[in-house]
Amino acid sequence: MEDPATARLKTLVVCSNDALEFKMVRSVDDLENDEITFRPELSHQVFGDSESIFGYRDLRVKLYYSAGCLETYLGMTYSEKINKTIYEGVEADEVLPKIAEKLPPDVHNNLDAFIRSLKKDSTFRPHGELLHSFSINDEGCQRRFEVYKADMTYKGFREFQQRLQTFVLWYIDAANFVDIDDDRWHYFNIFERYNTADGNVRYAATGFATVYQYYAYPHHTRPRIAQVLILPPFQNMGLGAHLLHAIYCEYIGRNQVKDITVEDPSVSFQRLRDYVDAMNCSTLPSFSRECLLQGFRKAMAAEAKEKFKINKKQIRRVYEILRLRATDVTNEQEYREYRLNVKRRLNIPYRREQNDIKKLECALRNVDKRANITLPTSEQRIQSLEKEYRSLEDEYKKVIKRLEDAEEL
């Protein structure tokens, strides 16, 4: 049984994800509005793998941003802090310095100074070139959004982007800040355009994407989407699809662009990418229902690459999604042909590995007669393949559901 002192120390440990609170502040009134508070999804990139903070009771760490130009305030409150003289030198964790070292140097630590800085939003306008504007119906309210592309040549953009990219710490695992001195980075930022009560136009930062321009032989480029984030207050509104659409439109008309790739996509972003690519490809003649049911064809890869700069691996995935949608799953033969078509593709890496292992086994036996490499049995491989297929089909169905929902709007 633990002693009372140890038990008390445990009560002074808090989850850092729960202690942190973020706000995008449009007016002074928002400072007291808990309904607009949002929290990080992860904090281990600042507070370590345990994602915990020790030494405080009722800890609240406040990281507030002005909605437009992202003036930043960092502060904290608590009802009790551990006394090291009572607990044999045990000290509370340093909280604000750990966060501050990840932020630009011009962060406010005085709330009054932050409040005074809010007036800057009245003159703030997004940096860069307007690429795409659209409106969405949010529970009966029309909201307008705009996507801009910018680079470091725009006055004030460097400071703005340094503030905006700090959100990756809390929402993208293993994220790194981009090198803003590398001009091969392209920046796509999305904003909500809204009116204040007195009719003045304001902008609120909503999300962003970064794209890196890789060289492709002999004289092409291959844009690679690196980071995409829609801020939590604006998620589940379909904004990610609009942002990705704007990125595609920027590159698909350029002859020097070979194709558009994605760097290590998360499950959620891959689903978004599948949706946008499937929506685009469904407009192409080579992806008609008749063509889809005949199997994957080179014409599909050629047309999708020409029209939308989609790479071959992603085109095959889109084909499988659209073919599943076109397949009558109540027709046993039609559904079976679809499953076999996908499984043959899934089995290609295994067959290659199987051949490599057999070659290695033969080579080893020439050296050591006792060498033996065990391969999965046919039954084991069938079970593994079926599990892999079912997982993939479940993902495809989520994309198809969104496609069908979009058609109903």
Image: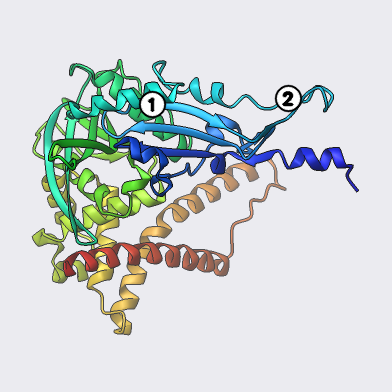
Residue sitting at x 53%, y 37%: 43
Which residue appears at 14% of the width and 55% of the height? 299
Quarter placement of the C terminus? bottom left
* In the rendered image, the vertical position of residue 141 relative to residue 199, given as above or below: below
Tell me which corner region of the image, top left, top right, bottom left or bottom right, holds residue 60: top right
Quick one: label 1, few (<14), some, or many (20+) residues within 10 Å? many
The residue sitting at 12% across, 51% down in the picture is: 303
Residue at image mark 1:
72
Residue beneath disc 2? 91
Helix or strand or loop: what does disc 2 sit on?
loop
Residue 44's x, y, as percent?
56, 35
Q: Quadrant of residue 183?
A: top left
Specify which label sits upstream in the sequence, 2 or 1.
1
Q: Residue at x 36, y 59 (%)?
A: 345
- Residue 296: which quarter of the image? bottom left
Query: Is residue 182 shown to the viewer in this render?
Result: yes
Out of 267 and 310, give the one closest to the viewer: 267
| Image coords of residue 123 (percent x, y) | 17, 26
As rendered, which of 121 and 51 lies closer to the eye? 121
Q: Is residue 379 left or right of residue 1?
A: left
Under mark 2, the amino acid is Glu
Instruction: Please determine whether, in this image, residue 119 is positioned above or below residue 258.
Output: above
- Mark 1 belongs to which amino acid? Thr
| Distance from the alpha carbon under mark 2 to that under mark 1 | 28 Å
**Position of residue 314 measured from the top left corner of the image (x, y, whole percent):** 28, 50
